[in-house]
Image (cartoon, rainbow, N blue to C red):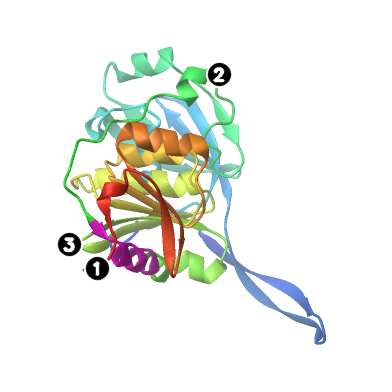
Amino acid sequence: MAVEAPATCPVMSAVTVRRSQWKQGLGPTSGERTLPEEMAVALVHDASTTAVMMATPADLEDFAVGFSLSEGVIDRIEEIRSIEIVESDLGVEARIWLAAGKGLSLAKRRRRLAGPTGCGLCGIDSLSEALRPPRQLPPDDLRIMAESLLMAMNALSRAQRLGQQTRAVHAAGLWTPTKGLISIREDVGRHNALDKLVGARARAGAPVGGVVLLTSRVSVEMVQKAAVLGASILCAVSAPTALAIRTAQAAGMTLVAVARSDGFEVFSHHERVVFP
């Protein structure tokens, strides 16, 4: 089945630059390299800035919705009235207008984030907000063959169009046993890529659940965001933190990490992975 196509982007998400290259024994050469774009993206709710992230300027409507959901600004997409993407010389504003009354509750828990490349915890003024309990996943009978997870991660790698161009971005994908890889989003920030995936699925009105695939390490906020998507299994190429494992265990999520071409490690709720 075809992978859900990313939305059009208001700004170029990659640029080609001139560069000099040196290799031992060959000497210097000149040429070009394609690199991902990075710019400030302000997430503005009801005319007040909630966060400023350094991000790849693609799929920004998805980013606005996903960030709003995964950071608890809204509980469901219907609480967003409209989204406007506005470019300026300094960056991009994603202007999100909330349903009546939702802005009042946001004001009570307002926090300002200003961090590098999708840093999801920079500037938080409340430790309880940073360590909020994850969304509880309902019990399910999802079981995945070990080989299928390897196939899923391989499919994610093949689907990374921006990643293949630049070798400098992260990806987050959603995979199911019946449909394969159904959605992928990319960004210079790992948090941003996952937020874009959350937003894409919410905007599509798609049912939650499945396996979230990541090209990054697994920190606690990545588990929290994957739980918002309703993912029973989270599979990543790099290792998790100890807190991420405890959070996945509490959420009822299977955490698979250190995924390589020949295997992986399972850290929580092992029962969902079936070994041959």
Tell me the SS state at disc 1: loop
Task: Determine the residue positioned at 40% across, 71% down.
Answer: 158
Cα separation between marks 2 and 3: 43 Å
Residue 77 position (above or below residue 60) = above
Residue 216 appears in view: yes
Mark 3 residue type: Thr
Mark 1 residue type: Ala
Tell me the SS state at disc 3: loop
Q: Bounds of the magenta span?
A: 144-155
Q: Residues within 10 Å of mark 3 (few under 14, many from 20)?
A: few
The residue tagged 3 is 178
Please state which of residues 62 and 246 is positioned toward the viewer in this rendering.
246
Marks 1 and 3: which is nearer the front?
3
User: First in sequence: mark 2 or mark 1?
Assistant: 1
The picture quadrant where one finds residue 182 is: bottom left
Q: Position of residue 177 (x, y in %)?
A: 21, 60
The picture quadrant where one finds residue 229 is: top left
Q: Where is residue 44 in the image (x, y as percent from the top left)?
A: 45, 30
Residue 95 appears in view: no
Please state which of residues 67 and 173 is positioned toward the viewer in this rendering.
173
User: First in sequence: mark 1 or mark 3?
Assistant: 1
Residue 219 position (above or below residue 6) = above
Q: Is 217 in the magenta?
A: no
Q: Say whether marks 2 and 3 touch (CB < 8 Å).
A: no
Give left or right: position of 102 versus 94.
left
Q: How crowded is mark 1: few (under 14 residues within 10 Å), some or many (20 or more)?
A: few
The residue tagged 2 is 125
